[in-house]
Image: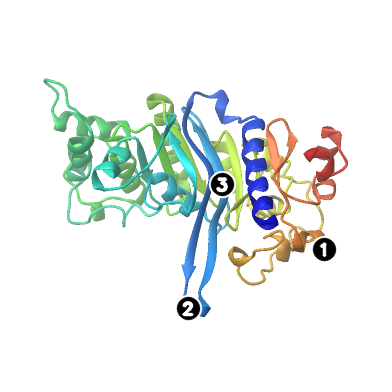
Amino acid sequence: MNRISKGARAHEEARTLHAVVESTAARRGPLAMRAGGLCKDFAIGRGRGRTVLSAVRDVSIDLHRRAVVALVGESGSGKSTVAKLLAGQEQPTRGSIELEGAPVEVSGRRAFRAYKSHVQMVFQDPFSSLNPVHTVRYHLERPVRLHRALGEGVSAEDVVVGLAEQVRLTPAQQFLAKYPHELSGGQRQRVAIARALAAEPSVLLADEPVSMLDVSIRLEVLGLISELRDRYDLAVLYITHDIASARYFADEALVMYAGEIVERGPAEAVTQQPAHPYTQLLVSSAPDPDALGSVLRSGTREATRASGSALSTTRGCRFGPRCPFVQDRCRVEAPPLVAVASDRAAACWRLDTTAPDLVSARGGGGVEDMTE
């Protein structure tokens, strides 16, 4: 009973903190989607050998119109699972999702189709996400007919041509007749973006949208998404392992490790002055010419060894086995997200060591002081 009450109390504290810490993205526009306390467990094996992996644990995200929120973390941290939960492709084990203030319950094909009219996803691989036997025209026309109510005098062809031109596939007629294999990687991703816009969504979930593109066109595609975000008042979730791109593209950054949010705040501040040891590790690994976060604690760069699966960790900090600042308390008690500024939070027992400047500015000596 005591264990259950502690878990419920920790969950409530996380939700309270999420509401208290100011969101940088909220300055851009009204709230479009809110996810609170999302959890996703997967059962592995059967019988006595059955184990449960917590792929997502108590993740809360607010997406605001005309804002980009970056969900940053290494492969296997749970970022794509969060995207699938928000897209309705997976059902959460616990937690809630609200769209435009209304609870989301996606059950059944018709409900899922209605939901997709508001929430669209751009996938990492633009080739596998497009059907190779259909032309670009088919990929754009189908969602137009499914999700749009065309006004009198407006044809689906007119809308399709407009979509192609908005993602800079010009002349449109030349590209609409082509098949995916006849396009470059950047052009295929533009088709995927246009297909998402065809449904006129309010939320766009971009799951590693540029990681498989040539470096020379990554900024161009990100710039296109940013332009479309402003034009259509989109709320964008940008999922990436590249914290450097999050700095330049996102308003707010949420750093995820082993299914949990370990740090959140303005993208510029999180990358320039990371508080959590894992964020420091990500920043120190980023090949950025401006030397992101040049002041890092010694030993963080070497903290790359893993010990088993962090997803199966039930006690203590999940980053503990890789952390250069780990202490006994970290191994037995999971740290809560605590505010280190009006718009920043981090989950670490050693913030007085990992981010002394932030703790000093906050006026506290450690996590205990900030949680009182």
Quadrant for the C terminus in the image: top right
- Separation (CA) of disc 3 from disc 2: 29 Å
Q: Secondary structure at mark 3?
A: strand
For this view, does 7 lie left or right of residue 169? right
Q: Position of residue 263 (x, y in %)?
A: 66, 45
Q: Amino acid at mark 2?
A: Gly
Q: Split into 4 quadrants, where in the image is the N terminus?
A: bottom right
Q: Tag 2's secondary structure?
A: helix
Viewer-proximal residue among 114 and 212? 114
Side of 127 where 13 appears, left or right:
right
Asked whether the beta carbons under mark 3 and mark 2 sit within 8 Å of each other, the answer is no
Residue named by callout 3: 59
**Dot 1 surroundings within 10 Å: few (below 14), some, or many (20 or more)?**
few
Q: Position of residue 25 (x, y in %)?
A: 56, 30
Q: Which residue is nearer to you in this view: 231 or 79?
A: 79
Q: Residues within 10 Å of mark 2 (few under 14, many from 20)?
A: few
Would residue 283 be found to the left or right of residue 200 on screen? Answer: right
SS at circle 1: helix
Q: Which of pointers 3 and 2 lies earlier in the amino acid sequence? A: 2
Q: Residue at x 70, y 53 (%)?
A: 284
The residue labelled by disc 2 is: 47
In this rendered view, identify the residue nearer to me: 328 or 197.
Answer: 328
Alpha-carbon span between mark 1 and mark 3: 26 Å
Say which of 276 and 50 sits in front.
Answer: 50
Cα distance in 3D space between marks 1 and 2? 33 Å
> What numbered label is drawn on residue 328?
1
Q: Extreme bottom residue here?
A: 48
Q: Return the x and y of residue 38 as percentages of the image width and height.
A: 52, 47
Kind of residue indicated by mark 1 = Asp
Name the amino acid type tagged 3.
Val
